[in-house]
Amino acid sequence: MLKIKNLKKSFGSLEVLKGISFDVKKGDVISIIGPSGCGKSTLLRCLNLLEKPDDGTILFHKVDITKNNINVSHVREKMGMVFQSFNLFPHLTVLENITLAPINLKIMSKGKSTSEALKLLESVGLLDKKDAYPSELSGGQKQRLSIARTLSRNSKIILFDEATSALDNNSQDYIKRTIDNLVSNHTVVIVAHRLSTIMDADIIHVVDNGKVIASGKHNELLKTCNMYKNLYKNESLNS
């Protein structure tokens, strides 16, 4: 579904990504973990072209989306992103935040969009908040709304950029359950701050200094990757 090969990205003289390569299969949950400043968020932003890679290829359904003739808006419709900062429209209700894009992009009629939005709100536990405004929601509720809004665009891949790092433990657990419920119908790529949110991922890629230094499942990495083991130990001590 997604094939990343030798991806490179620099900002001025700072080389952030130094040849990242990995595959994402349909239905997989892929996690990208590593210390602050290692390049993981830049990598995620390159996948849906919020950042343009300097070199390398990103094949999405066998089409290289790094080429200049690619419709970037179309890519972002199919590869939605959930940000840590929510990016909600404060003057719109919860329901309107979800229906805005499908209606404006002519993905659905107003009636169909409203119907689908109500189903999404029910799936993330926010149906009773449909007429509320973002300022009336908790951090966890805002994040669930962000997830529902991304799903409303029929995205096949959902990218999560440290989506739970600013939330308390209860909100984090609810978001994790919400993400888990997406697995059957979506492909998920998560940049994680907390390892507890990604321990069940199909593949975890450990990134350091702009490179993937190890890949595997949680239990495998605890045995084979010292950086991953140390990150896990530090989180356990601080929890």
Image (cartoon, rainbow, N blue to C red):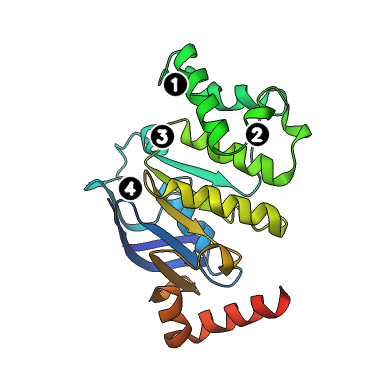
Label 4 near label 3: C-beta < 8 Å? no
8 in relation to 35, above or below: above
Residue at 55 percent of width and 52 percent of height: 177
216 in relation to 157, above or below: below
- The disc, 3 or 1, on the residue closer to the chain's N-terminal end is 3
Q: Which amino acid, by three-letter code, is at mark 1?
A: Leu
Label 2 near label 1: C-beta < 8 Å? no
- The disc, 3 or 4, on the residue closer to the chain's N-terminal end is 4
Q: What residue does disc 4 label?
A: 66
Which quadrant of the structure image shows residue 220? bottom left
Q: Which amino acid, by three-letter code, is at mark 4?
A: Thr
Measured in 3D between alpha carbons, the distance from the residue under mark 1 to the one under mark 4, in whole angstroms, is: 23 Å
Measured in 3D between alpha carbons, the distance from the residue under mark 4 to the one under mark 2, in whole angstroms, is: 28 Å
Residue at 50 percent of width and 87 percent of height: 226
Q: Which amino acid, by three-letter code, is at mark 3?
A: Glu
Q: Nearer the viewer, mark 1 or mark 4?
A: 1
Residue at the right extreme, as displayed: 136
Measured in 3D between alpha carbons, the distance from the residue under mark 3 to the one under mark 1, in whole angstroms, is: 10 Å
Q: Nearer the viewer, mark 3 or mark 4?
A: 3
Residue 105, label in figure: 1
Please give left or right for residue 203 compared with residue 1 in the image.
right
- The disc, 1 or 4, on the residue closer to the chain's N-terminal end is 4
Measured in 3D between alpha carbons, the distance from the residue under mark 1 to the one under mark 2, in whole angstroms, is: 17 Å
Q: Nearer the viewer, residue 110 or 183?
A: 183
Measured in 3D between alpha carbons, the distance from the residue under mark 2 to the one under mark 3, in whole angstroms, is: 17 Å
Q: Secondary structure at mark 3?
A: helix
221 in relation to 44, above or below: below
**Residues packed near mark 1 inside 10 Å, few (<14), some (14 to 19) or many (20 plus):** few
Q: What residue does disc 3 label?
A: 77
Q: Secondary structure at mark 1?
A: loop
Label 4 near label 1: C-beta < 8 Å? no
Residue 88, label in figure: 2
